[in-house]
Image (cartoon, rainbow, N blue to C red):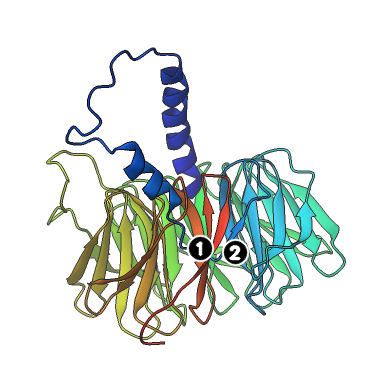
Amino acid sequence: LNNIGNYFLYTKNYDLADDLEDVDFEDPGNADDEGWETEDEMEADMEQDDSELTFSKHTGLVFCVSLDPLTNSLAVTGGEDDRAFVWRVNDGEVLLECMGHKDSVTCAVFSHDSSLVATGDMSGLIKVWKVETKEEIWSFEVGDLEWMEWHPGAPVLLAGTNDGNVWMWKIPAGDCKTFQSAACQSTSGKILPDGKRAAVGYEDGTMRVWDLKQGNAVHVIKGQDGHQGALTCLACNKDGSLVLTGSVDGNAKLINTSTGKVVGVFSVDKGKGRGSKDEDDNNSVESVGFCNILPLVAVAYLDGTLAIYDLPTQALRHRCQHEAGIVHLQWEESSSVVSTCSLDGALRLWDARSGYMVSEYRGHAAEILDFTINREASLAVTASGDNQAKVFCLQRPDR
């Protein structure tokens, strides 16, 4: 499952809730019975809101959020209502409403210089908007969209689709190149920091490193070297020499991008976390990331385990347990703090050196589907299934 894949899991629960509305329960019993929250307790839980600002313009689930890289003062959010909004994080004022999509907007990202924003919906309609003039300057339609990313130093956009293709366009000219592979879903992608290569994961467990200029795959990691299930996420370290991949098979693999060799495998299955069962079901990896200042990686699992691994020894250093599945993680730019968002609607900050939780932020009435943190790690912006985005001020004693 990825962030959007989780959506289909949730809708099943919502359908069940709709069905139960028609059922006439007779005696609710004693509310003080063990395992039941009283009405007052539930209201207290709902009332806790640690956020500084709530953005409520969406009329459906909010799937994605990102900050403009230049100033970190603008956010773009995409939602189930087929819309995206560009808005200011300090006061929530909408600068641009991105209209005309035909399906849920699941990708919304600023270009490297913050001048452009790309929005993509599940049906594959991609639009690019000029922030300053609030104009749509380009659009294109592909197959069902899985992921989308801007080049780190040029107005070039990459996208991966359900049919296995990876598309690359120069914006706004529209010059196009496609990177074709076996007819299986391209589930995740990341342009490496050199701007010349991209790491792309696929549904069959394969990862390819593409040469963006030549258009060929310089490395194909598959079979026993690849994953035994669909890739869900991937990340690269600061210089792009290593890529970490996560999969539904429960493993995270460390790959040298120069050689294409797997140089490490991380798994918590060997020592199962609290609340896990001795079943054959794999514990899907939902998000991965590298620490910038210490040789550490973080791997987030669907069972709620955040695992911190030591990169040189590949040993499990800390196991940080959540009560619900983790959707996404992000390391701070220049510290050893890693943040997570979870299906229980909380944002948590963890110190990877000690394994202890630094702080917890609540305010959403449903699961957090995505979040991002600014460069200074002073604020976080979250996107949730409660149709809202929120801005949280991240305060720590050491700042």
Which residue is more in the foreground, 397 or 214?
397
Q: Position of residue 89 (x, y in %)?
A: 64, 68
Which residue is more in the foreground, 137 or 244?
137
The amino acid type, in three-letter code, at marker 1 is Ser
Q: Position of residue 201 (x, y in %)?
A: 46, 55
Name the residue: 42% across, 55% down.
48
Left or right: 263 with respect to 78?
left
- Of tags 2 and 1, the one toward the viewer is 1
The answer to the question of whether label 2 and label 1 lie on touching residues, with beta carbons closer than 8 A, is no
From the image, tell me which residue sits under label 1: 51
The amino acid type, in three-letter code, at marker 2 is Ser
Residue 350 visible (yes or no): yes
134 relative to 275, above or below: below
Left or right: 379 with respect to 321?
right
Name the residue: 44% across, 29% down.
12
From the image, tell me which residue sits under label 2: 66
Residue 260 visible (yes or no): no
168 relative to 4, above or below: below
Q: Position of residue 142 (x, y in %)?
A: 69, 45
Q: CA distance from mark 2 to mark 1?
A: 17 Å
72 relative to 12, above or below: below
Name the residue: 55% across, 59% down.
390
Q: Which element carries disc 2, helix, strand or loop?
A: strand
Q: Position of residue 171 (x, y in %)?
A: 78, 65
Quadrant where the N terminus sits is top left
Quadrant where the C terminus sits is bottom left
